[in-house]
Amino acid sequence: MSSMREARPALGFIGAGKVGSALALALADAGYAVVAVASSKLAAARALAARIEGCAAAADPQSVVDRADIVFVTTPDAAIRKVASERRWRPGVAVVHTSGSEGRDALAAAAAAGAATASLHPLLAFAEVEAARRGLRGAFFAVEAEGPLAERLNALVADLGGTPLAVRGADKALYHAAAVFAGNYVLALLKLASDLWLNLGFDRELAVSALLPLMRGALANAEGQGLAAALSGPIARGDAATVQRHIEALAATSGSMALLDAYRCLGRATLPLAAEGGGLTPAAATALRDLLSAPDPSLERKQTKA
């Protein structure tokens, strides 16, 4: 083990929400000394500090800066620059924010005062603290850092059993957009699908319970077989007649224009994946693309008859 791994830094947290709490607890579990935590709500800082041996709740965030070797800024994104500009930083201290979309330039004020700066984003959903605390072990982390701090953060990620990914600050917005597709919009898809079941007379709870295994199965197949091999359904097999029936049914359903737009957009996005899977001929792909791009169902019917 390297000397850097042996001399673990003392950690502090400014922000005691879900991200800060889960990360502080996971790092304490991994043997790191979390020495201080501050929050806009002192009660939240006290609650988190009470769960970590040797950790103090600080009424003033400056106390965290003064006590820690690495200060994690786990506030909402909009507060990062304010935290960086209002603290008294010193050479030798490191400050790391956990935003997925902001680069480390959000900490420019701290860098100007001599602090080392970085961003470390856990690629994980933080809906609940204890689930995220467990999920951090083995997660992927986007790391934007240089020199010794990059080495130290990569070691920290390894101590969590995770995988560091070097992501440039200029690329953080695209990186985070991908996370939103995978971690947020998948829930919007489930909501849209369950909306259709409401039209069939089922309630939301039943719809979600019935559709979730289908979603889990598709994801498990993608993990085991790859994206193209896991794809099934009418677009994968070039079944334009079924796609047309879907479009007409959606168009005839009251208040479903958002659903129809989403169906068409996602259908077009699925075509390259279906072609990669080898089950879609060029002619079938063209027919489906025309069908999914038609402005209204009456034109779709004319194209299909032609």
Image (cartoon, rainbow, N blue to C red):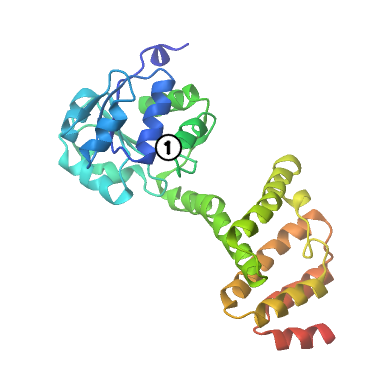
- 6 or 262: nearer the viewer: 262
Please name the residue that numbered disc 1 is placed on: 129
In the image, residue 267 lies at what x, y percent?
Answer: 68, 67
Q: Is residue 71 visible?
A: no
| Residue at image point 59% right, 57% down | 205
Mark 1 residue element = helix
How dense is the environment of label 1, judged by Cα within 10 Å: few (below 14), some, or many (20 and up)?
Answer: some
Measuring from the top left, give residue 168's x and y in whole percent.
Answer: 44, 43
Please state which of residues 228 and 115 is positioned toward the viewer in this rendering.
228
Q: Residue 45's quadrant in the figure?
A: top left
Q: Residue at x 49, y 24 (%)?
A: 158
**Left or right: 42 with respect to 184?**
left
Above/below status of 107 relative to 294:
above
Question: How many marks do you count on the picture?
Answer: 1
- The image position of residue 270, as x and y in percent, is 70, 62
Q: Is residue 113 above or below residue 191?
A: above
Horizontal placement of 140 versus 223: left or right? left
The quarter of the image holding the C terminus is: bottom right
Q: Quadrant of residue 80?
A: top left
Along the line of sight, which residue is nearer the eye, 41 or 296?
A: 41
The answer to which quarter of the image holds residue 181 is bottom right
Measured along the vertical axis of the image, is residue 272 above or below residue 292?
A: above
Residue 44 placement, left or right of 87: right
Residue 43 can be seen in this image: yes
Q: Residue at x 77, y 85 (%)?
A: 301
- Residue 232 picture location, percent across and down: 78, 56
Q: Residue at x 29, y 25 (%)?
A: 50
The three-letter amino acid code for the residue at tag 1 is Val
